Amino acid sequence: MAAAPGKCFLVTGSPGVGKTTLIIKVLECLKTSHPNLKVQGFYTREVREGSERVGFEVVTLDGRRGPLASTTNSSPESLRWPTVGKYKVDLASFESLALPELQVNENTDLFVIDEVGKMELYSSSFFPAVLKVLESNIPVLASIPIPKAGRDVPGVARLRNHPGATVFTLNTVNRDAVKERVYSLLVELLQKH
């Protein structure tokens, strides 16, 4: 007999393939079909100036937002911030928004974590909070980056290999099919919850 499917759904794929868009669409469908659904979490959104991406912001599911990373912040404190590529990561802003969203609460039906990536993992408090969410037995919908040059970020590798995790690799061809599959698996889980 096959093992029961886990409660952690991870969406991965190349940058710009639509991981965040898929998560938001699945969430919108779930809220339509389950109007009383209690969801906690956040997603990250690109910040653009014209056609140029200049950073990312964190947006909580109740609409609060703040900077995650920027190429344009030149404040004195930003000199001490970690960098990922050309981006300076604003850990204080990220933690103030994301960490409260990852507090396990027995009333929560679903956690959304977009994304568990290199920028977010600079926060020493973030990954332990993600692990607590995974251990809570509450369904999780999260996104993770695709390994670069065959190498995974250590925290991401732990999630990808977590026994309860199902990984969906997104590409431009399978986006709608993956969205439908993730949505139906979540609906199934929520009916048992």
Image: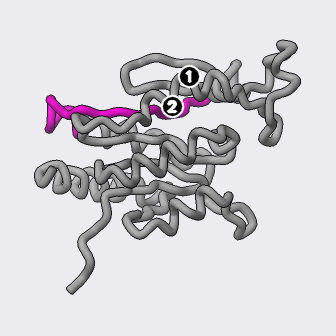
Residue at left offset 79%, top offset 26%: 71
Residue at left offset 28%, top offset 54%: 180
Badges 1 and 2: C-beta atoms under 8 Å apart? yes
Question: In terms of image quadrants, where is residue 27?
Answer: top left
The amino acid sitting under disc 1 is Ser
Q: Which numbered tag is attached to residue 96?
A: 1
**Residue 158 higher or lower than 125, as above or below:** below
Q: Kindly identify which residue carries mark 2.
A: 99
Residue 56 in the figure: left or right of residue 192: right
Most extreme residue toward the left, as rendered? Answer: 191
Measuring from the top left, give residue 174's x and y in whole percent: 41, 60
Are there few (<14), some (14-19), or many (20+) residues within 10 Å of tag 2?
some
Q: How far apart are marks 1 and 2 (CA)?
A: 6 Å
Question: In terms of image quadrants, where is residue 23?
Answer: top left
Measuring from the top left, give residue 125's x and y in whole percent: 59, 39
Residue at left offset 83%, top offset 13%: 75
The answer to whether residue 43 is magenta is yes
Q: What element carries label 1?
A: helix
Residue 150 in the figure: left or right of residue 75: left
Measuring from the top left, give residue 135's x and y in whole percent: 38, 54
Viewer-closest of 16 and 92 = 92
The amino acid sitting under disc 2 is Leu
Q: What element carries label 2?
A: helix
Residue at left offset 82%, top offset 36%: 86
Q: Which numbered tag is attached to residue 19?
A: none
